[in-house]
Amino acid sequence: MKKKVQLVHNPTAGDEEHEAQDLIALLQKEGYACEYTSANEENWPLPDSYTGLIAVVGGDGTIRQVAKALVQGAWADSHLPLAVIPCGTANNIAKSLGISAPTRQIVQSWSQCQPQPFDIGKVEGLSEEAFFMEAFGFGLFPDLMDAMKTLDKPENPSDELTFALEVLHELIEKAKPCQARLTIDGKVYEGNYLLLEVMNIRSIGPNLALAPNADWGDGAFEVVLVSEEDRNVLAKHVLDQSHGIHDVFPLPSIMAREIRIEWAQTNAHCDDERIEALGPVQLQIQPGRLQVLR
């Protein structure tokens, strides 16, 4: 691997070991040349021909920013692998990749790692074409996003995740199901659902693993549907998670590659972005669209 790294850093994430100057010094000590970019900058410099890796330091939102540049932005022609140093709140993507070591150990591991194909989901039917790395869905999770914007959150990341689970539990108890029609690889599903999530990785939101068997490189989604009949099952699972009881989510998922969704309301999300879906949407898996180091 070429020994120059394009470092994209969220300066508001993480602790002292994630300060810009410390990250640059660490990379240089491990033998890497480094081009630093703040994730808050509007225009990121193009990687040059000596660059062998894009390293992102931040949470799921920052990873998605970089992925967007690699998938449909200015870096789309670079075909460079992505390395993750997690320092967000939930870190769902990093956890799905099995990346949780201290920063120095992560950087030291790069020389032994190989790029792995990472699928993304393509979404059509919105105001503009979109993609997702984590999940696309309707119902409870968009409602949770709306609720969290209005509340004072704990400063500690672990406490914030527990708080979000508690808020979600309250929403589950009072949520009204919504009529939906899905066509999943040609098969039709109709019903009234509290939650509909098309998962590309195992967990979303406050580390809620709705698709424990999801594989980000298998060329397929996992579709999770929670009906009125399963309200209590979901509520108990979320409550248990908030109390530190990490049992496996008991409801099944449906493997899918192409999906059409008609949802009677507009409240939707694409990864951590709250959006409005004003009509039917079509989702398609794009196998190996990204390359990630692990």
Image (cartoon, rainbow, N blue to C red):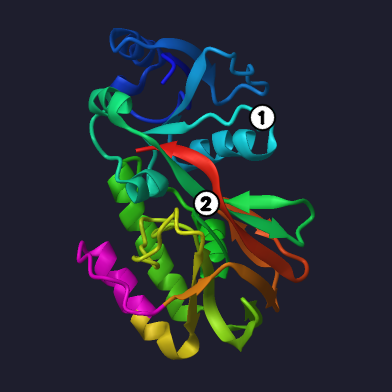
Is residue 174 shown in magenta? no
Q: Quadrant of residue 55?
A: top left
**Which quarter shows the C terminus?**
top left
Q: Which residue is mark 1?
A: 77
For the record, the magenta segment spans: 234-252
Q: Amino acid at mark 1?
A: Asp
x and y percent of residue 212 in the render?
34, 65
Q: Is residue 153 above or below residue 231?
A: above
Is residue 240 shown in magenta? yes
- The residue under the point 64% across, 62% down is 284
* First in sequence: mark 1 vs mark 2: 1
Circles 1 and 2: CB atoms closer than 8 Å: no
Q: Which residue is mark 2?
A: 119
Q: How many marks?
A: 2
Q: Amino acid at mark 2?
A: Asp
Q: Is residue 38 visible?
A: yes
Q: Toward the viewer: 199 or 226?
A: 199
As measured in the structure, the alpha-carbon distance from the residue carrying label 1 to the one carrying label 2 is 17 Å
Secondary element type, mark 2: strand
Q: Quadrant of residue 186?
A: bottom right
**Mark 1, residues whose alpha carbon is within 10 Å: few (<14), some, or many (≥20)?**
few
Q: Is residue 7 visible?
A: no
x and y percent of residue 163 in the render?
35, 56
- The residue under the point 62% across, 76% down is 185
Q: Is residue 86 above or below residue 183?
A: above
Secondary element type, mark 1: loop
- The residue under the point 48% across, 32% down is 81
